Image (cartoon, rainbow, N blue to C red):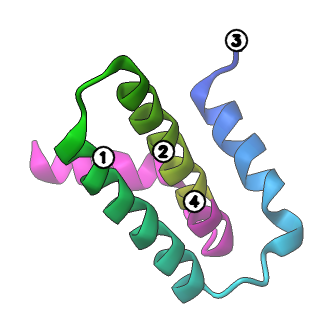
Amino acid sequence: MSVHFEDLWEQCEKLHQESNSTDVSIIIDELLMKLKLYKMLDDKIKTEDQLLAKSRLLGEILLTITKISLKDNINVFDALVTAYNFHN
């Protein structure tokens, strides 16, 4: 798939437009569940299949974050630049 990251992010947000009525707290619960699963996988990563599962799960985590950025209308580029500048 040859697409710029920002275009992909916007496409992912569009996936969620119809279900945009979901409360942020529900989305965060979903994100926390996926993060806990990621942590469990991280403790056990040994095989290539497990690494592939971990990569797939990180994609699911990012997709969930697109729900939050859509719901709260956050410019994720500006948010990331601000965080980067703060930590740099």
| Residue on which disc 3 sits | 2
| Residue on which disc 4 sits | 64
| Residue on which disc 1 sits | 41
| Whole-number angstrom distance, CA of label 3 to CA of label 4 | 21 Å
Main secondary structure found in the magenta portion: helix
| Whole-number angstrom distance, CA of label 3 to CA of label 2 | 21 Å
The crowd level at tag 1 (other Cα within 10 Å; few <14, some 14-19, many 20+) is: some
- Looking at the image, residue 71 lies above or below residue 5: below
Q: Mark 1–mark 2 contact, CB under 8 Å? A: yes
Identify the mark nearer the N-term, 4 or 1.
1
**Res. 64 image quadrant:** bottom right
Identify the mark nearer the N-term, 3 or 4.
3
Q: Which is more toward the observer, 35 or 45? A: 45
The crowd level at tag 3 (other Cα within 10 Å; few <14, some 14-19, many 20+) is: few
- Looking at the image, residue 87 lies above or below residue 72: above
Along the horizontal axis of the image, is 61 left or right of 18?
Answer: left
SS class, disc 1: helix
Q: From the top left corner, tell me how far across and down residue 87 is, in percent.
A: 11, 49
Identify the mark nearer the N-term, 2 or 4.
2
Q: How many marks?
A: 4
Q: From the top left corner, tell me how far across and down residue 22 is, in percent.
A: 72, 83
- Which residue is drawn at the image coordinates 51% and 49% (left, top)? 62
**Res. 34 image quadrant:** bottom left
| Whole-number angstrom distance, CA of label 4 to CA of label 1 | 18 Å
Q: Is residue 75 a member of the stretch shown in magenta?
A: yes
Q: Which circle, 3 or 2, is nearer the viewer?
A: 2
| Whole-number angstrom distance, CA of label 1 to CA of label 2 | 9 Å
Identify the mark nearer the N-term, 1 or 3.
3
Q: Which residues are magenta?
A: 67-88
Q: From the top left corner, tell me how far across and down residue 56 is, in percent.
A: 52, 36
